[in-house]
Image (cartoon, rainbow, N blue to C red):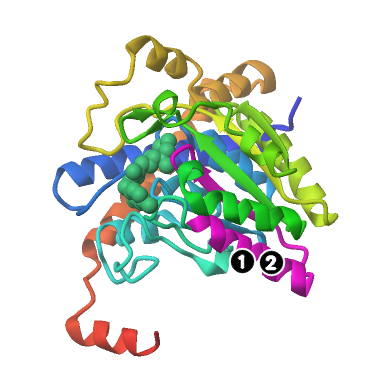
Amino acid sequence: MYEQEFVNSLYIQLYRIRHFETECIKLYRQGLIRGYFHPYLGEEAIAVGTCAALEPSDYITSTHRGHGHCIAKGAELKYMVAELLGKKTGYCFGLGGSMHIADLSKGNLGANAIVGANVPLGVGAALASSLIQNHRVTAVFTSDGGSNNGVFAESLNLAAIWNLPMILVLENNQYAVSTPISESTRQPELYKRGQALGIDSMRIDGNDVFKVFEKIKQSAKKCRQGKGPVLIEMLTYRHGGHHVNDPGTYMPREKLDYFLSIDPVKRCKTYLLETVGVTEQDIADIESGIHKEMQDAIEFAKKSEELSQEEFLELIQDY
Ligand SMILES: Cc1ncc(C[n+]2csc(CCOP(=O)(O)OP(=O)(O)O)c2C)c(N)n1
Ligand SMILES: [Mg+2]
């Protein structure tokens, strides 16, 4: 059995991401968030289990569906909401938006809207760690769609031949937009792509936060011993369409119901109640604390301003 404090910390992060996404979808529907918004609902255990198993100084690179990765790696909700609302108090001065959030102070090297493009960036970070021997591990989040981008194979091959300290976290939610993996590959067991390159690779239940934590912990240890990289395919499912305005009607109801029944947030809550022995009131207290944090974050973001033209021009001088 896991310690109460540890399970609480996982639940806090799972629920924080769940609530953040739910509230931000409302802001999106009010027209306050522009562009695309790809919810992480249903996949929270992957980000939370992974980042809980990393050291704070380790790195991540993230994707277009990246809010959960950022929060799990320690992002503050108020700067996240401000970024989504395009405000200058956001992580990237409101210039990056939903798909381009970075926070170098927490080792988040950035999300990326180009599917697969964060994989070579992660290899670069891992190569740097290997050369300067800073013992940091890079967890690269990618997706079933990302694994079909050519750069995926090239990057993994380099990581393999150079034994880089990199964990490829392959979030297999079984769709790239509306295309099921059965139509995009003949080999739906995506971890086998790592095996083909001589990489220690496996598939696990991506809705089980404890399993994710354990496998990442072991993999990070291997990486720090110079025995990386590792590829972990994490099987999961979105709770809805590809983005907020996609009703996801192509997703078979029984399959969605199955994944809703193994919802990662509910599973961790059940563990807290039935195995750790916390009370419903303890859980309600955690959740209301997060509701308050999110309310404050939304207020902070709404009150913040956008960059002025002068501020924008001054800022880009440095780049
Ligand atoms: C290189 C590239 N091709 C196409 C797109 C358009 N696009 C955005 S998300 C997406 C599907 C992504 O599916 P997947 O990689 O499985 O990630 P998921 O959305 O399921 O998390 C596509 C095709 C893109 N952003 N980048
Ligand atoms: Mg996918």
On screen, 164 above or below 127? above
Q: Is residue 60 magenta?
A: no
Label 2 belongs to which residue? Answer: 127
The one nearer the camera, 246 or 230, is 230
Residue 21 position in % (x across, y down): 35, 41
Q: Considering the numbered disc 2 on the image, is that residue within a helix, a strand or a loop? A: helix
Q: Nearer the viewer, residue 78 or 58?
A: 58
Q: Which numbered dot is residue 83?
A: none
Mark 2 crowdedness (10 Å alpha carbons): few <14, some 14-19, many ≥20: many
**Dot 1: within a 10 Å radius of its alpha carbon, few (fewer than 14), some, or many (20 or more) residues?**
some
Residue 303 location (% of width, % of height): 22, 64
Quarter holding the N terminus? top right
Q: Image quadrant of ligand 2?
A: top left
Residue 124 circle label:
1
Q: Where is 112 relative to 24, above or below?
A: below
Q: Are marks 1 and 2 in contact (CB under 8 Å)?
A: yes
Percent across and percent down for residue 61 are 53, 57
Span of residues in magenta: 118-145
- Residue at the image position 47 percent from the left and 33 percent from the top: 43
Is residue 196 placed above or below 224 in the rendered structure? above
What type is the residue that disc 1 sits on? Gly
Q: In the displayed structure, would residue 19 be above or below residue 269?
A: below
Is residue 9 visible to the viewer in this orientation of the structure? no
- State the image quarter where residue 162 is shown: bottom right
Q: Secondary structure at mark 1?
A: helix
Q: Distance from label 1 to label 2 (Cα)? A: 5 Å
Identified by mark 2, the residue type is Leu
For this orientation, the residue located farthest to the right is 225
Quadrant position of residue 42: top left
Q: In the image, residue 28 lies at what x, y percent?
A: 21, 46
